[in-house]
Image (cartoon, helix red, strand yellow):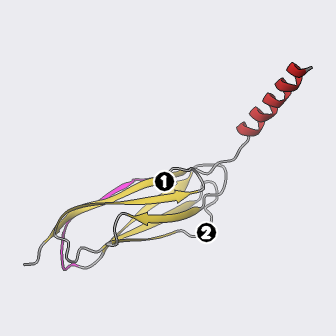
Amino acid sequence: MKKLFLLSVLIMLFALTTNAQTPYPKFLTTTHDFGSIGEDSGTVTTRFEFTNDGDAPLIIKWISASCGCTTSDWTREPIPPKGKGFINVSYNPKGRPGVFTKTISVRSNSSDQPIALQVKGTVTSTM
């Protein structure tokens, strides 16, 4: 009797996990190279676009940049399955000559692990 009960519980758990709906953000690209930009050319911005390839609505919970020189804006409403969303990332080169690579961590309801986006380039001095 115990074996039959255990087998029933295992079958139910398997059925529940295989029917779970999960969102899945699929990015066109996760890196953007601004190339060479002047220190006084002002803030530069790029857009990372993605599709929800999962079977449940995708919600971007929060985004964090590796430094204050990088800011972001994103799709705030839930993205339905097969729907599209974006994350705009801006970098301010003022006072930061040289090569840079900045990481933007994206947390969503698709995983406990953040997705890493990167922007990079070279800031040329105006002096």
Q: Is residue 13 left or right of residue 34?
A: right
Q: Is residue 64 left or right of residue 66?
A: right
Q: Quadrant of residue 76?
A: bottom right
Residue 118 counted in the magenta span: no
- In front here: 35 or 103? 103
Crowd tier of the residue under label 2, counting other residues whose Cα lies within 10 Å: few below 14, some 14–19, many 20 or above: few
Q: CA distance from mark 1 to mark 2?
A: 19 Å
**Tag 1 and tag 2, C-beta contact below 8 Å:** no
Answer above or below: position of 3 versus 18. Answer: above
The quadrant the N terminus occupies is top right
Farthest residue, direction left:
127
Label 2 secondary element: loop
Residue drawn at the location 56% of the way across and 62% of the way down? 60
The residue to which callout 1 is attached is 114
Q: Quadrant of residue 17?
A: top right
1 or 2: mark nearer the eye: 1
Q: Residue at x 86, y 19 (%)?
A: 3
Other-residue count near label 1 (Cα within 10 Å), few / some / many at <14 / 14–19 / ≥20 = some
Would you say residue 38 sits in the magenta stretch? yes
Instruction: Pick whichever, 94 or 29, lies toward us.
Output: 94
Is residue 4 something that shows in the picture?
yes
Q: Nearer the viewer, residue 39 or 45?
A: 39
User: Which residues are the magenta region?
Assistant: 27-41
What is the quadrant of the C terminus in the image?
A: bottom left
Q: Amino acid at mark 1?
A: Pro
The residue to which callout 2 is attached is 77
In the image, residue 59 lies at what x, y percent? 60, 61
Q: Amino acid at mark 2?
A: Glu
Residue farthest to the front, as pictured: 2
The total of numbered circles placed on residues is: 2
